Image (cartoon, rainbow, N blue to C red):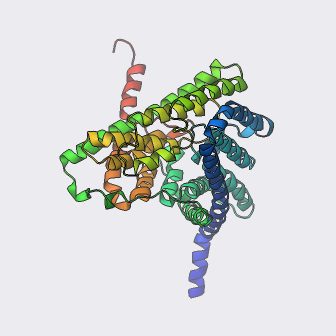
Amino acid sequence: MIKALFKHIYKYYKDTFILAIAGVVIGVLVGIIDAAFGLGLNACTAIRTKYFWYLIWFLPLGGVFIWFIYHQFGKSVANGMKMVFHVGLGKNTKLPIRMVPLSVIGTWTTHLFGGSAGREGVAVQIGAAVSNNVGRLVDKTIDIENSRKMFLITGMAAGFSGLFCTPLAAIFFALEVLVAGKLEYHALIPATVASISAAFTSRALGLRKFHINILETLNYHPSTYNAVFLLKLAAMGLCFGIVGSLFALILRYLRLKFAFRFSSPVKKVLIMGAVIAVLMMIFHQGRYSGTGSNLVALCFDGITDDIYAYDWILKMALTILTLSSGFIGGEVAPLFSIGSCLGYVLGPVFGFDPMFGAALGFASVFCSGSNTLLAAILVGVESFGYNMLPFFSVVCFVSFIFNFNNSIFTAQRVAFTHPVRHQRLKQRIAPKGN
């Protein structure tokens, strides 16, 4: 009888066991690569900080170098995240493994010479490419329905988790980012195993997680909820939602504008690289270079005059210029920085401590800009403590509603129509005279 029971379990769960094992392999591999990438990026940041006045002059040439390596070795993977989304949405079948070294080198170059960009795009591409290739090997052994999307989601979770060391947020980011409003639960088991494995691996190899328990030093507690408190949180969520949405809209607009405005990508990156270099020198000598982790740290150092009221605007503008000019990097880390700086300024306006506002902005501007709800709430609680869950829930709900389905991921699909957008669409297609 026991033997029959084990046969029954094996029959129904053998694919699950195989996927879990594959998730461990993917998580460890991606965690190792993420750790190497992250530690290399930290080294680039340290060198840039020390020699900023020498390196910033070479930012335009760094842009040309990025164009050259992609032109020579990676024309087919130049779209980066868009290519990842196309595989997940069934428009493509595979991700060449060469996108890993190209995206790593490109991002290191951007950060070394003073561009303003993130890092998660590379991590997600690393995870997606590794997982896609592992998945093709597994497909030769067993036949799993919809395995291509499942392995892609698994790799995306591992890539995000390995870099940020936030495994729960990474799981739900991967499950919800391909199609906003839809969770890909069929990939839950391998994505969970891969995410946890990647986080443990990268931390064991030296990557450090950003974490600060805000409520240990602030006098806020979920039991203090009242109508006025909730309305203040909702108002802040509205502000964060608009800023995240504007970031995505302006970035998309300028990418298209520059593509039409400049006759060649080399000319674009040379001219815009020179413009960005001058702006970086004018505005506080590199304060807005890199991921913005320096600004996030300033928001939580307890010194009230370290953050300027315009920090979030300049970080947003320079990140948009950098990414729309042909430099390589992500958008999520700058969104964390923009949100933290904005929240630090808005917090006192609504009667909150600046650090409390910065923590809320950290998660909810990311929520709006990426059009992902659960991932944003979880990245907040994993970074600032699980006792912040009620606060993050309110601001992220409102931020998500008021981003009007705009996203930094241009290939992202939407499973629902926003009420405001739906009403405008009805007005456009209504016959004249009605």
- Nearer the observer, 109 or 151: 109
Is residue 2 toward the left or the right of residue 134 in the image?
left
- Asked which quadrant contains residue 141, the reply is bottom right
- Asked which quadrant contains residue 91, the reply is top right
Q: Where, quadrant-wise, is the N terminus in this rendering?
A: bottom right
| Residue sitting at x 61%, y 79% | 7
Looking at the picture, does residue 77 appear above or below residue 165? above
| Residue sitting at x 69%, y 55% | 130
Image coords of residue 368 (percent x, y): 43, 40
Let me know if residue 201 appears in the view.
Answer: yes
Looking at the picture, does residue 314 appear above or below residue 160? above
Image coords of residue 340 (percent x, y): 41, 44
User: What is the residue that sits farthest to the right in this orientation?
Assistant: 72
Let me know if residue 148 appears in the view.
Answer: no
- Nearer the observer, 408 or 221: 221
Q: Where, quadrant-wise, is the C terminus in this rendering?
A: top left
Is residue 350 toward the left or the right of residue 330 in the image?
left
